[in-house]
Image (spheres, helix red, strand yellow):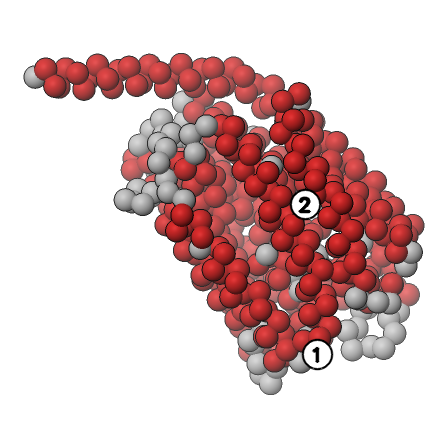
Amino acid sequence: MALMVMGYLTIFCTNTLGIPALTVGSLMLASKFLDGVTDIFAGFIVDKTNTKIGRGRPYELCVIGLWIATLALFLCPASWTTTLKCVWIFCMYAFANSVFMTFLNANQTVYMVRSFSDPKHYVSLSTYGGIIPMVVVVIFNIIFPILMGKFATSQGGWITLIAIFAVPMTVIGLLRFIFVKETNNVDAKAGEKLSMKDVFLVLKNNPYIYIIALATLIMNLVTNMGVNVYYFTDIVGNVGLMGALSAVQIIAIPLMAIMPQFLKKTTVVKIIRIGLIVMIGGYVLNFFAGSNFALLAVAAVMFGAGSMPISMLSGLMIIDCADYNEYKGLYRLEGSLSAINGFATKLGAGLGAGLLGILLGVAGYDGTAAVQTAGALNMVRMLYSLIPAALYALVYLAFHLYKLDKLMPEVRRVNAANRAKKEQKEAVTEEKMEDQ
């Protein structure tokens, strides 16, 4: 939800603060260099954490800082000079993404595998549980444009609009910390002995996490580009229809309810490939749709349904990568693996917003102009159709290199045997100590 709110930062900066689109895009891209450093260290810190309440659970509190920093982005005074505005936006954007979002991403899988011992629960959380945030996001996409039309006519209105979401989302974000405890220990090695050398060794020997990260990056780049508000403003001519389009996407959500049945018959990767083909078709259809709402609605259902496997099942693939690390005799490093994927999430979001500003700026888009040039309108169309289609085609090709799904039966068998041997050895040692 925070990422989706930040997806509207570009249009706030260009149309309310008066910052050039090219400058906004450059600021967001620059912040990603900081992310590259903080993500690696955040994953390392989470993997080394050992507290009375758990390893991943303490970092759930970062949701408070995330929403404070997100709200602060829209508190930037319009009366400031452009330089001061840019400094403020860069700092708050860095706090939100490079610090708080980083730790929330790094702790995700660590927290899950230590709260539930049955792998079937992972599937349920990623599918049935995944329906909940998807419904919420659809509701957000329906409500936000409506509220945006009502409130986002001034900076004070923008602040009110963001606060409407920031306060309840902070409360909801804390529920897991309050009610879900870590009770399962899956570590094959002690986290206290972990060093940065071990992290880099894992990243060197596990190529599969990079394919997952690429898919996450592209999906967040496209989702958070924020071009839809420009498209419905300048091509369709009615920004209010964005909410109606999001409502149509609800049709695709029930597919998540039958996803566990698909997983019994095939692999996660095969489901993702099918989803990618559907998404590509949807974005190609957008190119021909123009202002035709019926065609835009069909396309929205297609790329909405197609995106579900990647967004909901990537966590299962990260757990597989951790199992693969254990199979290779390395640290599992769920935190570091999640941090890599989290970095891809934020990099994709930043690239999306950044490239949007840069490409619109290059095409001559002017947020204060009554009518846009033909070049600017063509760029908006391309960003809403063929460019996302080409990016997802790249992801489809990358997943042909993902072989881990075929290796997993052997990986799980070996890991189970090694864990049984370790438990037996510990039991014998404990028995000897009791005898002594």
Q: Secondary structure at mark 2?
A: helix
Task: Please state which of residues 164 and 70 is positioned toward the viewer in this rendering.
Answer: 164
**Image depth: mark 2 or mark 1 in front:** 1
Tell me the quarter of the picture where residue 242 sits. Answer: bottom right
Q: Residues within 10 Å of mark 1 (few under 14, many from 20)?
A: few
Q: Residue drawn at (48%, 43%), measured in percent from left and top?
A: 108
Residue 350: x and y in percent read 62, 56
User: What amino acid is found at the position of numbered circle 1 in the picture?
Assistant: Thr
Q: For mark 2, what is the residue?
A: 218
User: What amino acid is found at the position of numbered circle 2 in the picture?
Assistant: Ile
Give the farthest residue toward the left. Answer: 436
Q: Residue drawn at (45%, 61%), measured in percent from left and top?
A: 64
Q: Secondary structure at mark 1?
A: loop
Q: For mark 1, what is the residue?
A: 153
Q: Quadrant of the C terminus?
A: top left
Task: Please state which of residues 137 and 69 is positioned toward the viewer in this rendering.
Answer: 137
Residue 119: x and y in percent read 49, 28
Q: Residue drawn at (82%, 44%), measured in percent from left and top?
A: 282
Above or below, 121 relative to 384: above
Q: Residues within 10 Å of mark 2 (few under 14, many from 20)?
A: many
Disc on the earlier residue, 2 or 1 = 1
Give how far apart the Cα atoms at labels 2 and 1 are: 32 Å
Residue 284: x and y in percent read 85, 45
Residue 234: x and y in percent read 85, 67
